[in-house]
Image (cartoon, rainbow, N blue to C red):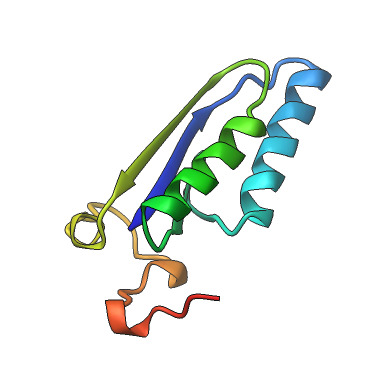
Amino acid sequence: MRMLVFFDLPVTTKADRRAYSQFRKFLVNDGYDMLQFSVYGRIVANRDAEEKHYSRVVANLPPEGSVRVLTVTEKQYASMKILVGLPLFQEKKVNAHQLLLF
């Protein structure tokens, strides 16, 4: 499964920029890869892992802005079509038997 985080955060004041930076750093340190600006995703093994990472996102939410989470299956994620641009290195297709869980 893939867990996608979409966010739109204000960056008008110094405090807003700091909150944006902290949230983005949290996502990167928690294993999320940037798919597009303000769209990050990561692989989760099952519903338990999804709940764990969802709770971590909720615990690190910035005070203002909009943050959304969407979880999709690998099959749904693989059916995503890129209309302009090229897939990122992190987006190369990974078969279920190629996943390594630590």
Residue in the foreground of this view, choosing between 97 and 18: 97
x then y, percent, for residue 5: 46, 40
How far from the left and from the top, in percent, is residue 77? 25, 56
| Camera sees residue 11 | yes
Residue in front for this viewpoint, 59 or 26: 59
Seen in the picture, residue 63 relative to 25 is either above or below; the reply is above
Residue at the bottom extreme of this rendering: 98
Asked if residue 51 is positioned above or below residue 89 in the image, the reply reads: above
Q: Position of residue 86 (x, y in %)?
A: 34, 64
Quarter holding the C terminus? bottom right
- Residue depicted at x 60% and y 41%: 56
Q: Residue at x 46, y 80 (%)?
A: 100
Q: Position of residue 44 (x, y in %)?
A: 43, 59
Q: Is residue 52 left or right of residue 93?
A: right
91 vs 84, left or right, is: right
Q: Quadrant of residue 31?
A: bottom right
Residue 95 in view of the camera: no
Residue furthest front in the image: 48
In this rendering, the answer to whether 25 lies above or below 79 is above
Looking at the image, how many numbered discs can be counted on the residues?
A: 0
74 relative position to 86: left or right: left
Q: Quadrant of the N terminus?
A: bottom left
User: Within the image, what quadrant is residue 14 found in?
Assistant: top right
